[in-house]
């Protein structure tokens, strides 16, 4: 094995923390001595030891003089856990190979500088692009304080999300639907508009056997959510936030008794003001959100420049119908040159369905 192999092993380890470390980054670490891996670890859960400390704890022999490969710059400040730089220096590690720099102002080069000042050989930016791909959510959240918003929808080949009757179960097949639950496990929150909830009465939970439920976030400017809905009935088991512009006092009290957290958000164009809602959610440490509908909410999020990625699941079906629903509604753009634009395509076959993933161009935000 060589340096790239060790760092790619650290990257693979980091991915094991997906869905559990938020709002922290996913990080993996590998310790190598005399050409052999003697310890490895990853950040498993927010509030628990970081990857470097887990790797040191797993060492099969003293790490003195060894090299540490870590996907993100080691922290050098006290947060939920002590600084990893302290543990590295105490261990006698001789060299640290770092993938991504940490944009957190409390770190941002200080971790690497501290190690160098103590005589540790530090190499920065190793396989940086691959390591950076681990943490777009963390980078965005730590730099803006806003959740990383991912727009997701399923549609037919003719761009319909439901038949003309409104029936939408199911557009895609079982494999694609299972993949959506992987996304629900990955991101901290899941957001939907009240129209979608009234039409489908969804649970908006993660159904993976070892998955984690995201915080449910509903945009319901007039608090129309039925008290007998599945979401209300499960609000004490699954964290649930309601964003309302005009909150009826009695209805708000009843929702909160059932476990729903109601946020009063100013109204804009007849809807909850999404940028203000994102600021409020960021302060609650919700670092990422999967937006699952409906069409008006999706358009509003795109128009406000809040969307960072799009996942489109495309089924090999055609529904037709001029009035059938489409993924993004609203007033739309006036000409093709005003379109919302995307890049960095990724295409994945899920049985007969396709999953298209794109990132939003920064100049569009």
Image (tube, grey):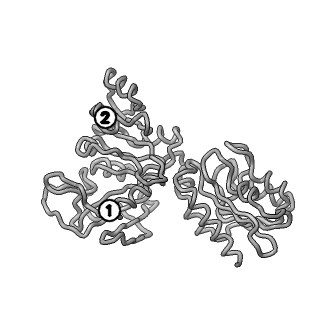
Residue placed farthest to the top in the image?
250
Q: Can residue 263 be seen in this view?
A: no
Q: Which of marks 2 and 1 is nearer the N terminus?
A: 1
| Residue 293 percent coordinates (x, y) | 31, 50
Specify whether 167 is left or right of 268. Answer: left
Specify whether 331 is left or right of 215. Answer: left
Residue placed farthest to the front in the image?
209
Q: In which quarter of the image is residue 131?
A: bottom right
* Depth order, front residue of 327/200: 200
Please rate how many residues cluster around mark 1, counting C-alpha atoms within 10 Å: few if below 14, some from 14 to 19, many from 20.
few
Dot 1 falls on a residue whose secondary structure is helix
| Residue 73 percent coordinates (x, y) | 69, 58
Specify whether 5 is left or right of 283. Answer: right
Instruction: Give the label on residue 193, or none.
Output: none
Q: Which residue occupies 66% across, 49% down? A: 105
Specify whether 87 is left or right of 307. Answer: right
Image vertical order of residue 190 relative to residue 280, above or below: below
Instruction: Give the label on residue 221, or none.
Output: 2
List the residue tagged with mark 1. 174
Image vertical order of residue 15 relative to residue 105, above or below: below
| Residue 56 percent coordinates (x, y) | 76, 58
| Residue 19 percent coordinates (x, y) | 52, 53
Q: Quarter of the image containing the N terminus?
A: bottom right
* Depth order, front residue of 2/175: 175
Q: Cα distance, mark 2 to mark 1?
A: 33 Å
Residue placed farthest to the bottom in the image?
1
The label nearer to you, 2 versus 1, is 1
Q: Which residue occupies 55% across, 49% down? A: 22
Dot 2 falls on a residue whose secondary structure is loop
């Amino acid at each position: 094995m060589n340096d790239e192999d060790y760092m790619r092993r650290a990257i693979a380890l980091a991915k094991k923390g997906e869905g559990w470390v938020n709002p922290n980054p996913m990080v993996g670490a590998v310790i190598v001595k005399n050409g052999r891996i003697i310890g490895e670890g990853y950040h498993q859960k927010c509030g628990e030891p970081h990857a470097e400390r887990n790797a040191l704890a797993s060492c099969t022999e003293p790490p003195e003089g060894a090299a540490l490969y870590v996907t993100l710059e080691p922290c050098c400040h006290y947060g939920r856990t002590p600084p990893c730089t302290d543990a590295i220096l105490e261990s006698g590690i001789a060299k640290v190979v770092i993938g991504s720099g940490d944009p957190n102002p409390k770190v941002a080069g200080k971790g690497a500088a501290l190690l160098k000042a103590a005589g540790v050989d530090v190499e920065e930016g190793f396989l940086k692009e691959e390591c950076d791909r681990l943490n777009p959510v963390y980078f965005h959240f730590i730099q803006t304080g806003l959740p990383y918003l991912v727009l997701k929808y399923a549609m037919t080949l003719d761009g319909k999300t439901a038949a003309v009757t409104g029936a939408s179960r199911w557009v895609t097949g079982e494999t694609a639907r299972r993949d959506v639950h992987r996304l629900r496990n990955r991101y901290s929150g899941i957001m939907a508009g009240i129209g979608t909830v009234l039409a489908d009465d969804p649970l908006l939970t993660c159904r993976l056997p070892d998955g984690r439920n995201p915080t449910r976030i509903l945009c319901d400017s007039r608090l129309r959510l039925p008290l007998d809905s599945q979401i209300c009935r499960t609000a004490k088991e699954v964290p649930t936030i309601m964003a309302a512009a005009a909150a009826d006092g009695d209805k708000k009290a009843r929702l909160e008794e059932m476990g729903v957290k109601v946020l009063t958000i100013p109204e804009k164009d007849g809807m909850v003001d999404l940028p203000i809602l994102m600021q409020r959610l960021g302060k609650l440490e919700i670092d990422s959100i999967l937006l699952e509908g409906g069409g008006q909410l999706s358009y509003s999020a795109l128009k406000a420049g809040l969307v960072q990625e799009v996942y489109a699941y495309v089924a090999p079906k055609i529904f037709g119908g001029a009035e059938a629903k489409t993924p993004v509604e609203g007033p739309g753009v006036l000409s093709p040159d005003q379109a919302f634009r995307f890049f960095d395509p990724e295409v994945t076959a899920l049985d007969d369905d396709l999953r298209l993933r794109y990132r939003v161009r920064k100049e569009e935000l």
